[in-house]
Amino acid sequence: MTPVELSRTVLRAVRRAVDDGELSVAVPARVVVERPRPGGCGDYSTNVALQLAGPAGRPPRHVAELLSRRLSGSPGIAGVEVTGPGFLNLTLADDDPGALAREILARGGGYGGSDVLAGQRFEIRIPYEVRAEVVADSLRRILATQGAQAHVVHGETAERSVAHVVNLRPVPAPCDPALLGRDASRWALLLPAAHDRPRIDDEHLAQRESNPLFRVRYAHARTRALTRNAAALGFTAEPGDVRGHDAATGHDAAIDHDAATGHDAATGSGDATRAPADAATALHTALSAHPRTLTLAATHHAPDRLARQLVVVADALLGFQHTVLPQGEEKPSAAHRARLALAEAAGAVLAGGLSLLGIDAPEHL
């Protein structure tokens, strides 16, 4: 279920409550649903009960409970919970295994954006120092994904009309990071939390697994390579069920293939200790967390949260990549097309996240 479809579902619940005489209000033209704010739960949240409470002459939580009963059991909704003064938190039913990949591919770099901070203006105050400049630049971009406007000033200059002032004073770098080059220097300054001293050394340039920046950029390059390789094999991405279900046997064909060959598709090793379904679940979980991470990075003024989440997505993708293409005598199947879609979705998240940090996402590495 897409956010637009979910909004319509909530609106129908409001309309039914009005038609049945439970609420005496004008039915709104639309209902806004968004990713839950800090303290919320579920997949989406809406404050429609708070908006209707005044006109209805009811406490917001009473309206929320009323709508909760009508939404519970609706197609596509697995659960409804009321939190705070009357927020409705909605958990979606996993009735479309390709929904996440489809949403990410449709939104591209905009995946994870919301209007949580819509209409809010921020003034980011920083000293004349290179790490503060880099952190403020990334924070400004991240705030924009949540609907906020932000600008950076040096010193204590204030704009009276700005409601929110952010004083950024990250621990300075111990030496000039410029020798690392633009991408590695930005990563070195952004990955640690603001209160931690950044490490400036050649490890950020190392083309090996121990370097988180290398893993993130390599993972993105791998998603592009998978798309090219799939095209050479004659198939393209199509969001759907990543499990290779064999209708004749009732078994997961991909798992059976690995068990028969002794090959672990998730790690590329000879120990079949991790099934493709497990690798897909890990990647799905990492991608699902991206919107929440962006919101937290914006509200806590912490781009390092995004950097660390990109490492999580990259590691999950690198554990999943070996399941995407057919192996041996396998023919491309619906499961392969679905896995390719999930991998391409991961690539979009990695590219979008790196862009917010001001770092390039290479097509080849």
Image: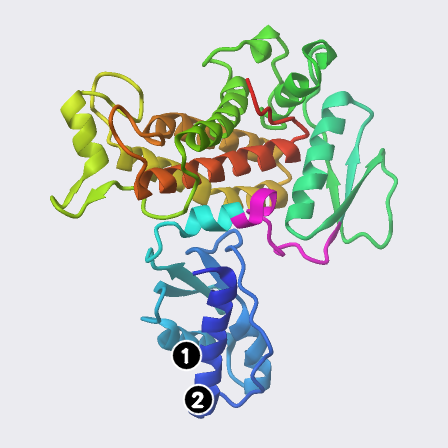
Span colored in magenta? 106-121
Q: Amino acid at mark 2?
A: Glu
Q: Name the residue at the top extreme.
A: 202
x%, y% of residue 252? 19, 40
Magenta span contains residue 157: no
Is 55 located above or below residue 134 in the figure?
Answer: below
For residue 22, the mark is 2
Residue 334 visible: yes
x%, y% of residue 339? 37, 38
For residue 327, the mark is none
Name the colour scheme. Answer: rainbow
**Quarter of the image with the C terminus in it:** top right
x%, y% of residue 42? 41, 56
| Image-based side of 115 in relation to 308, left or right | right
Secondary structure of the residue carrying numbered label 1: helix
Q: CA distance from mark 1 to mark 2?
A: 8 Å
Secondary structure of the residue carrying numbered label 2: loop
Q: How many marks?
A: 2
For residue 66, the mark is 1
| Image-based side of 248 in relation to 53, left or right | left
Q: Which secondary structure class fits the magenta region best?
A: loop
Residue 85 visible: no
| Image-based side of 4 in relation to 151, left or right | left
Q: Amino acid at mark 1?
A: Leu
Is 298 located above or below residue 227 in the figure?
Answer: below
Q: Is the residue under label 2 in contact with that under label 1 (CB below 8 Å)?
A: yes
The residue sitting at 54% across, 59% down in the picture is 34
Mark 1 surroundings: few (<14), some (14-19) or many (≥20) residues within 10 A: some
Q: Nearer the viewer, residue 335 or 99?
A: 335
The residue sitting at 36% across, 48% down in the picture is 240
Q: Nearer the viewer, residue 216 or 224?
A: 224
Q: Nearer the viewer, residue 294 or 339?
A: 339
